Image (cartoon, rainbow, N blue to C red):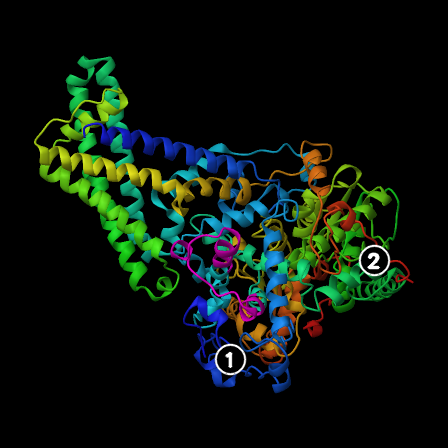
Amino acid sequence: MELIPYVVAYIAIGVFLIACVARFFMWSSMPMHMRWELYPVAHEPGRAHYGGSYLEQVDWWKKPRETSLMGEIKAMVPEILFLVALKEHNKKMWNVSFPFHFGLYLVIGCTMLMMGSAVLGALWPSLISGGLGQVLRLAIMACGYGGLGLSLLGAVGLLARRMSAPELKDFTVAADIFNLVFFLVAFGLTLVNLVVFDRDFSRSFAFISGLVTFNMVALPGSPLEVWMTVASAVLLGLLVAYIPLTHMSHFIGKYFAYHAIRWNDVPNLKGGVQEGPIGVMLNQPIGWRAPHIEGDGTKTWADVATRDFSKGKTK
Amino acid sequence: MNQPKSVKDIARGDEPLAHIEVSRQPPLPPPYDNPDDLPPITPLTDAARDKYVVLDDTIALNIPKPTSREEEERLVNKFLDGFHRLFNEADNWTFLQPLMMSVEHCAKCQTCNEACHIYEESGHNPLYRPTYRSEIFRRIYFKYIKNASRWVHGDIDLNWKTVARLIELAYRCNVCRRCAQTCPIGVDNALLAREIRKVASQEMGIAPVELHERGSMLQLEVGSSTGMNSLVVKDNVEFIDEDMSEKLGFEVKTPWDKKGADILLIHNAGEIMAWPENVGCFTALFNAAGLNWTMSSELVAYDSINYGVWYDDVQFARTALLHARAAKDLGVKKIVLGECGHAHKALTVIADKVLTGEMNVPRESCMPLLWEIVKSGAIKFDRSRNDFPVTLHDPCNYVRLMGIVMPQRHILHEIMPPGRFREMTPHGVNNYCCGGGSGFAIMSGHNFGDWRHHMSGRRKFRQVLEAFSNEPMGPEDYKYICAPCSNCKGQLRDLIAYYDAFEKHGICYGGLVELMVNAMVDAQPGFMDWEWH
């Protein structure tokens, strides 16, 4: 019985990491594509604020190409933390989506703080028993209660909007409802467990400590108290494993949507590193069958792109 | 049916899915605020309704209704074959990653809808949501490519109506990508419209006749979608040179096929036919600035258009290669694109992944070069000659999609008296499409022109009226929409004519170089001819 939450947690973390890495590799190993950037591009130094680009210069290819990592960070951090695009363009949705997402960040923060505290406690017990430990405990509780509360509020709001807003209803499928209900049940049970049975997070902390130190001890407390913590841990574990297997993995996709597409303005300069891979792409077989292409799987893109249609028609 | 109730309606019923009543659209600003005064949308003929698939009040593609079960099945199967190719690396390396990203990660939050001028101006008809066609696309993808559960991704009935209507619906989007700008995740629903067009063209051989047979194919066959071959184009430009020389009071002569020139200038050949003064102005300005430049009479190289960018990657690549080949053969240092937005994006940005080695001749927009000319002081300008209200239309293709925002504004501020420039709201990279984007400006089959003016172009017309809202609106109170893009000019020309905005309210349009030449001190005054409308 005492091993169940640990085993579930290890498996969940494993599935989460493997699924995330697999998705990351899937997106990063996709073939080169045509440029399809969309302005503003955040790394344009001195121009990003109005959406300008290096293409505003005469002979842009002769100029040193400058990009601003700080510009990207200034755009990405508020977007990730506060969902600024959603706030600007869809305030009704932001009102429920922001607390949901920000709550998730706080819950992740709470978990990380517990893990960090557990590692510190294992390595330097004296460090964690003093003032720093007290600060960490307060931070853990604030993030935990705040995060779960905000996320639950957001999930209820999202569910209500999905089921009632006319513009969303037709696009809502069973999985959308299931996902939100899954969050509500997992976070709801966890919050109830904390409020009723584990107000100072001591049992939860014991579990996390056991997890990070690979010391899978039985959790302290009455059977009901232990059962509630185990149930919360198992549900949260299943949720962690489930997220990257669904479209909720958009946190990975979003990175590529911005960096590989929307902000990918790297030019193909003559003699540069892109020309080789482009040649490979153009020498792939093409199968499109419309009469003006007549791809048969043996002709290449280069073959069909250089077909001459002008013979006898230009005079 | 006035509007679909569900995405599943795409597969149901025989009647059109939507109908637009002008009186129920959001009213335009004065003096067009009375919907009863606006021209109605001409109904489709019964013959057209009987013969072709009808999605709404208009027809873009002329897809014949299948007459047998076999024809229905053939349509669906061909579509599915093409749909599979979209997700095949060799067949669609060109856009596979952006496509997959947009298919897999939509959270269906509907944020993008309000950014779409067509959906907004339709009075929020669900058919025109960017997400409506995309949701159908996604459901087909998850059902037929991924074999996923309908509980997870929704269900769709893929019959011939779904196929034909979805393809038609792909031509109710300007592919301006304003929706993509607002997506919190980075999903691009406009791209999906283009990918549907690709399946139709590249696999099924279905595309608007204006874009394909009379567009990109004609260009590849004779050199230009205008039908002009190299002899005719040179002859026409010679006539333009003579006319401009007479108007300006100094010799205007366009150089052709000059080996080793610094610049190969490529115009949209539509300018030569419809707005010859634009071509003449470029020649006058480049010569006056002392640039070493040329035009090319090689096949395709005198027409910068690349309609493939709207519907077909193969046609796109073919055209881009011919443009680059002409530049390579002439040995020029760079290609400069004239005032044509989609040509800018096609050759400067998208063709970047097609051109290699000697074909990789640098390409740039005319806007920075024109600004360089103004800054250099090589040409003297008299601002007082442009003493009338001017607003600037931002062509999506080189503003939102290439980030060329300021050079044209800097130029206007240098060649106009202070206080005469009116920015539209919104502008720059947040601009609205003119409504002619992605080929619409040259599509007028059946009553498509009516639909274009009432739906896709209505937001731009609204913006123009708002920009000039504090100006006198009499017919002699001339106001100028500076639209430095051939396609946008075509759309504005049609919009102004449709709403009678020149005759009634003095609203005129033109490019940027016309304003520059109008202010040239060395030119005879009075170049600006308000009858250009």
* Image location of residue B427, percent across then percent down: 52, 57
Residue B234 in picture, x, y percent from top left: 87, 61
Is residue B492 visible in this depiction of the protein?
yes
Left or right: A29 in relation to A238:
right
Percent coordinates x, y for residue A78 in the rendering: 38, 41
Above-or-below relation of B488 to A66: below
Report the amino acid beneath label 1. Answer: Glu
Residue B439: horizontal and vertical position, in percent? 65, 64
Instruction: Give the quarter of the image for residue B342.
Output: bottom right
Residue B437 lies, with reference to residue A55, above or below; the image says: below
Mark 1: secondary structure: loop
Which residue is at the front of the view, B168 or B474? B168
Give the spatial CA distance, label 2 vs label 1.
Answer: 40 Å
Q: Nearer the viewer, residue B500 or B26?
A: B26
Instruction: Classify mark 2: helix, strand or loop.
Output: loop
Residue at point 32% right, 38% down? A240
Residue kind at label 2, given as amino acid type: Phe
Q: Residue at x 23, y 50 (%)?
A: A153
Left or right: A77 in relation to B19: left
Q: Is residue B225 above or below residue A233?
A: below
Q: Is residue B141 magenta?
A: yes
Same-subunit check for callouts 2 and 1: no
Q: Is residue B476 visible?
A: no
Residue range highlighted in magenta: B137-166
Q: Is residue B390 above or below residue A219?
A: below
The tag on residue A309 is: 2
Q: Residue at x 65, y 68 (%)?
A: B441
Observer-nearest of A208 and B56? A208
User: Disc number at residue B15?
Assistant: 1
